[in-house]
Amino acid sequence: MSQSGPLKTRKRERKVEDPKSRHKRHEAMEAVKALDSIRFGFSENPKEMEYFYDLFERVYCSGETLHTDKPTIGTLCIQAPYEIIYALGGVPVRLCNGFHTDEQSGGDFMPAKSCSLVKATLGMLNQHNIPTVDRLDFIVHPTTCDQKTKSISTIEDMGYSVYHMEFPRHKESEESREYWRRSVRSFAKELSVKIGRKLTRKSMKEAIKKVARAQLAYHRLSELMKNDPVPILGKDIFLVTNAFFFDDIERWTNRVHALCDELQKRVDEGYNAASKRSPRILYTGSPPIFPNLKLPLMIEQADGVVVADESCSANRLFNDMVSVDEWFLYDMVDAVADRYLKGCTCPIFTRNEDRKRRLADLAKRYSIDGVVYQSFAGCQVYEMEQRSIQRELEKIGIPMLYVETDYSPGQGGQLSTRIEAFIESLKVRKRRVDHKKRGAV
């Protein structure tokens, strides 16, 4: 009896951590671990990458908030027109989240077999703990992903104001294009009322040019990735593109150009960020979003190098620029709408020949040795489309590895074994091709 009393006293005195604080602490630990792998797990990172490493450390690891002086507009898909948000003085912040802890808590709102990304997003929104911002003034939801669409009532019940942008599932007809234009026009009017600022010809033109400058910076970065040897690893490219979703757009553009200047020097000097035999990988499928960059990291830890991607966390966002015939306000709004629909290669479309053509084009222009196709468990459209994509790649002789993942770090051993085997098979294939070429000479 004399021992049980003090023990009980010590238990009562032990501080009980608030669940929200514990959740936030676990997220910070997850972010630190991912960033350390990207930053310190590889040698000779470009010096200009320090800006991006520091940005993620401040925002995701230390909880710093940005854009406190402007309306923050949460986006649930890259089909939300950034140009209109910027033209009205707002800042777009992508809400698709990558924390494993958020995926676990999001499971309270979604069936067990739902998409990991959607569960993580719901878990984050329920905690009201959104990286980069201390508040959300508005959420815009283009009706692309069915699971997000069905989750909107849950998000509204959490206290968020959500605007729905109706998105067509067929883009080839003039009817679908006009349908989407009307959706974009309505969004521009609604956001103008919400923010309390009028959309003007001048602000719209400036916003289009601002986003175009960011796209040109990314295109410059992409062109440098065509070089063999490659001047930078893909894990850094994904970090750069992820930063676009929350950084100040003009600061981001300037830092990408500074990075490109450094990489151009590397190209001129013949520097190789990978090894001599590293297979060149095209990444496609479900988007790699920080801190869930485990698959790109595994690819490059296995001596592959991701030189191109076709995903909505990078290439797809920057793909096409706004083409304006007349710089009148309504013409510019319609031109913005066209840019988001015509260039879209999301698998939600009834037919997706554009995505097949784009993958084949990327494989050719970036001298791709193999494709890694990721699908989050529960993401049915990517799961369904992978077979048709594989058949298309087989026609041009490009091997593809299909990987189904969630956000769990526990998959590491099994996944890394599959990745290593795929990379090794590409190396063997590459050696055979080189041998035949030498023999022919």
Image (cartoon, rainbow, N blue to C red):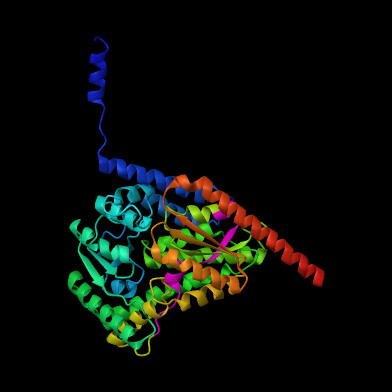
List x then y, in percent, for residue 237.
50, 61
List x then y, in percent, for residue 359.
52, 72
The front one of 269 and 123 is 123
Q: Which residue is farthest top?
A: 2
Kindly identify the residue that appears in the image at 41 percent across and 75 percent down.
344
The front one of 293 and 326 is 293
List x then y, in percent, for residue 101.
35, 47
Magenta region, residue range: 299-323
* In this view, 122 is above or below 320: above
* In this view, 375 is above or below 16: below
Kindly identify the residue that appears in the image at 39 percent across and 73 percent down.
211
List x then y, in percent, for residue 7.
27, 18
Q: Is residue 8 left or right of residue 246?
A: left
Check residue 306 for magenta coloring: yes
The N terminus lies in which quarter of the figure? top left
Kindly identify the residue that appears in the image at 30 percent across and 88 percent down.
328
Kindly identify the residue that appears in the image at 41 percent across and 56 percent down.
377
